[in-house]
Amino acid sequence: MINMTRKIPRPYNAVRGEITRCTTLLPRSLTLRARGACNGARSSRPVQAGNSGASTTERLRRLAPAAGSLQGVLLRLFPFAVFCENQRYCTRSARVCQPRFSGKIPLSGGKNVDEAAASAYNKEKYPALSPFEAPQKERYMKQIILTGDRPTGRLHVGHYVGSLKERVALQNSGKFDEIYIMIADAQALTDNAEHPEKVRQNIMNVALDYLACGLDPEKSTLFIQSMIPELTELTFYYMNLVTVSRVQRNPTVKAEIQMRNFEASIPVGFFCYPISQAADITAFRATAVPVGEDQLPMLEQCKEIVHKFNAVYGDTLVDPQIILPKNQACLRLPGIDGKAKMSKSLGNCIYLSDSPEDIRTKVMSMFTDPTHLRREDPGHTEGNPVFIYLDAFCRPEYFPEFLPEYSGLDELKAHYQRGGLGDVKVKKFLNNVLQAELAPIRQRREDWEKRLPDVYEILRAGSETARKTAAATLHDVRHAMRIDYFEDNNLLRKD
Ligand code: ATP
Ligand code: MG
């Protein structure tokens, strides 16, 4: 065992910790990115790892000063490997934080960097990565989902087709290592500051809707945003990387400011919510964010923040990808009043928890094609909410069950377009479709309503788990920004 601390000459960072075991194959020569401890300047240069006669640990030790630190060497070798005792993966070629090295370092990732793995390196898939990095990435890059909803009301069918259905499918696909589903109460307060009660009451409503749709607390971590104070601190740092004019140009923010009549007096918190959303996504190192189309500008803004942060402070944050619904009709489901988006705040929703009677009343009162006044008039199906809902919800098996005289949706649309098909008949069919889709969800919700203490416990435990993840990321962020002052004695140095 070698204590590295005293052997690494200044001005390089030393790592407090010990190497206990290293079984990896080291390449003869490495190009290491050196980072000076004082000014953070970087340069790249090839470094000789030494001959193979020396032990791996000894060669690692020789490389350390040239890399700026032992961290530099380890990162170059195992950018995606498991480094730390608590089994958190280092998913990026990010700097590894010092606390992860305090105590003993099990270099479990090293085992996999052998020649067989290197030869399995797929050049096409990872053209930018070295033969050492690619297999590691393949093996260790964690797939993580983060998404959520504001507790401003019960969830509606727009949420279901726009995001919830996809989340449940992704959850059950088994392709994701971690799934975080956030009830965004802090974000809801940005435009509901005077109605905290509304936000509080809807937390359980949203949680019940989640469980009713099939989100499984065994597979997904359900949590409450404001219970994770680390998110606020991340937001505060990210604010420095975004300009006011950039937020002003965000089309979703623009539309929402207009919708809420905030033009003259925008609450600062509301204005900044895209930045706080970037904090939410990056705190969980999300690789995938399944959301509706209105969130596209938010994701773009988040990616910009990630790139800026990584460029300024070093590769730390994970670049997320948006997952939009594949069905065009689900991208942004219109309201029953024909407005461009069904939204809790606009009160134009069919809620997942609506009674069969409510659903029927809402469907029969739905906005349709205003030019289709009489049954025999030719009608428009494009932009007609009733047909958009059918595109979003109808399955082929519903025709033989509820409308056997038509073979499918195309035939129904063709009839409507040429005239002779009344709105009432189409609406009755839509009502049957929605009733069939929503009945099992309503039933599951009723079951969970009888188990409110369990729902409470799911949120409490989920928030606890989520907080640990966010705290680890915040730690990395503070380290990258070199504001983790008391983690080392750098403040005492004169150089
Ligand atoms: P609010 O009016 O309070 O903003 P909302 O109805 O817009 O509420 P959010 O909580 O903002 O709902 O959105 C949660 C998720 O649901 C987001 O991913 C959003 O894209 C998606 N979503 C919301 N409304 C729709 C819709 N009408 N069609 C498709 N997806 C939607
Ligand atoms: Mg919204």
Image (cartoon, helix red, strand yellow):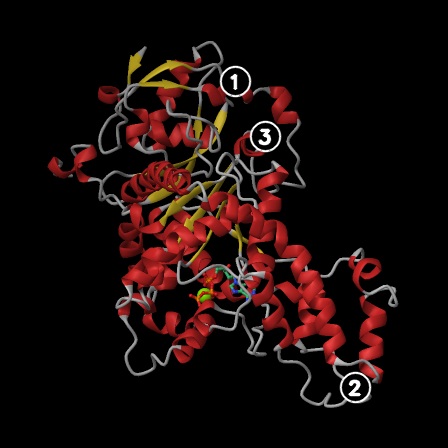
Rendered position, 294 above or below 167: below
Q: Earlier in the sequence, mark 3 or mark 1?
A: 1
Specify whether 168 is left or right of 491.
Answer: right
- The kind of secondary structure element at disc 2 is loop
Q: Residues within 10 Å of mark 2 (few under 14, many from 20)?
A: some
What's the CA distance linking mark 1 and mark 2? 72 Å
Number of marks present in the image shown:
3
Q: Mark 1 or mark 2: which comes first in sequence?
A: 1
Q: Which corner quadrant of the image does residue 169 belong to?
A: top right
Distance CA(mark 3)–CA(mark 1): 12 Å
Q: Which mark is residue 111?
A: 1
Counting residues from the start of the chain, the first of labels 3 and 2 encountered is 3
Which residue shows up at 62% across the image and 24% down it?
117
Which three-letter amino acid code belongs to the residue tagged 2? Answer: Arg
Eye-nearest disc, 3 or 2: 2
Which of 421/121 is in front? 421
Vertical order, 241 against 25 (above or below)? below
Q: Is residue 297 left or right of residue 364?
A: left
Up the image or down, 88 lies above or below 470; here it is: above
Q: Amino acid at mark 3?
A: Pro
| Disc sitting over residue 274 in the figure | none
Residue under numbered circle 3: 135
